Image (tube, rainbow, N blue to C red):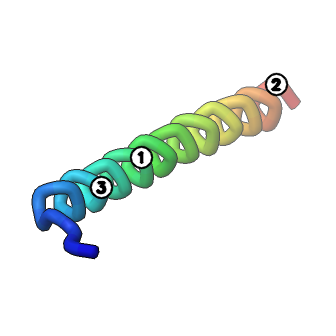
Amino acid sequence: MQRSPRRVRSSAKDLIKSSAKAAIDLGRQAARLGMESIKRASNR
């Protein structure tokens, strides 16, 4: 069983890409929640 380094590298790249996408999505969600909470606080 011999693994090609190219496949490993691509899989690692995909992992990094997917994790980065997840982090960006989380950041967007947090920003949206923060904006909503700020709006609520200002409305009060």
Check disc 1 and report the residue beneath it. Answer: 18
In this rendering, is residue 10 above or below 39? below
What residue did someone put label 2 on?
43
Label at residue 41 = none
The alpha-carbon separation of the residues under discs 3 and 2 comes to 48 Å
Of residues 27 and 31, the one nearer the viewer is: 27
The secondary structure type at the circle numbered 1 is helix
The residues bearing labels 1 and 2 have C-alpha atoms spaced at a distance of: 37 Å
Q: Give the position of the C terminus as an image quadrant.
A: top right
Q: Is residue 30 above or below residue 7?
A: above
Q: Label 1 crowding class (10 Å Cα cut-off): few <14, some 14-19, many 20+?
A: few
Residue at left offset 23%, top offset 63%: 8
* Label drawn at residue 11: 3
Instruction: Name the residue at 72% across, 30% down.
Output: 36
Q: Does 20 sit left or right of 31 as displayed?
A: left
Chain-order first, disc 1 or disc 2: 1
User: Is disc 1 in contact with disc 2, using a CB cutoff of under 8 Å?
Assistant: no
Judging from the image, what secondary structure is the residue with disc 2 in?
A: helix
Side of 18 where 10 appears, left or right: left
Residue type at the position of mark 3 = Ser
Closer to the camera: disc 3 or disc 2?
Answer: 3
Q: Residues within 10 Å of mark 3 (few under 14, many from 20)?
A: few
